[in-house]
Amino acid sequence: MAYEVVQLPVWRDNYAYVLLGEHGDAAVVDSPEAAPVLALLDARGATLSHLLNTHHHPDHVGANAELLARFPHAAVFGSVYDQQRGRIPGQTRGLIDGETFSFAGVQVTVRAVPAHTLGHIAYVFEDGSAFVGDTSFVGGCGRLFEGTAEQMDHALNEVLANLRDDVLLFCAHEYTQSNLRFALSVDGDNPALRAFSAQVDAMRAAEQPTVPSTVGLEKAINPFFRADLPALRASAGLPSSAARHEVLGRLRAMKDHF
């Protein structure tokens, strides 16, 4: 890998990511606060070249202004949707689905994954890392604040699920235990889910992060990646004729009140 990923716990349950290139360049993905990022950059003697924002929520862009005060020449990326609405502080480039750029010599492909917000994007690095913000969590998915269940179904089951199974999914929150409690309530006969839930409980007891996940793991344990299966349709109380996105939408509504 041409860069190191440093996962910083910030706020109560957020993760910010600092990508450290081999030649002193650095990128930050979705940080709500600047102090821990700046401390790391100073400790490593790194210069911030990119701010990569998945969407506009304050717990993802809150650090932008302070980071830009220190590194005013850093490029600030986000979706063209958010740029047109001025929702990301300091944004310098609006990205569309399929657009590419490079960081530390690695090609990055932008994927539009609107659902949690209408401007949400993911950054897919060709070396096998994907930074997915609040679209996919370990064992869960983001709330539908602006988008629809159909959009979330497309994001999960047509965009992310079609990546290689070994691609690492770096999400922005440590929500895994609560996600798995819900997953077990709707997919409790899933042996992979039961085994993984026990593993997660042990990891959290040891204060270890459960992020990142992989595409293959999410296909095995995440009900929102499994919404087409009979067990999940039954748990959602929907007939076999219901479209997959309808099942996903019902499950997401159930999770909202779980």
Image (cartoon, rainbow, N blue to C red):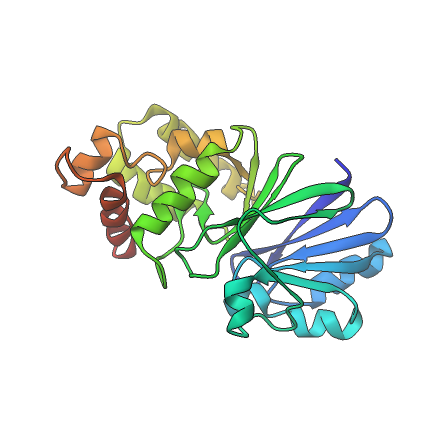
> Residue at 77% across / 49% down in the picture?
20
Q: Which x, y percent locates residue 116?
A: 40, 57
Q: Tell me if 176 is positioned left or right of 123 in this view.
A: left
Q: Could you say which quadrant of the image residue 40 lies in? A: bottom right
Q: Tell me if 170 is positioned left or right of 142 in this view.
A: right
Asked whether residue 238 appears in the rendered view, the answer is yes
The quadrant of the picture occupied by the N terminus is: top right
Q: How many marks?
A: 0
Q: Which x, y percent locates residue 180?
A: 37, 41
Q: Tell me if 8 is positioned left or right of 43 in this view.
A: left
Q: Residue extending furthest top? A: 191
**As displayed, is residue 61 above or below residue 256?**
below
> Residue at 26% across / 27% down in the picture?
189
The residue nearer to you, when weighing 4 against 95, is 95
Q: Which x, y percent locates residue 134?
A: 47, 54
> Residue at 47% across / 33% down in the picture?
162
Q: Which x, y percent locates residue 120?
A: 48, 57
> Residue at 72% across / 55% down in the picture?
27
**As displayed, is residue 45 above or below residue 241?**
below
Asked whether residue 198 appears in the rendered view, the answer is no
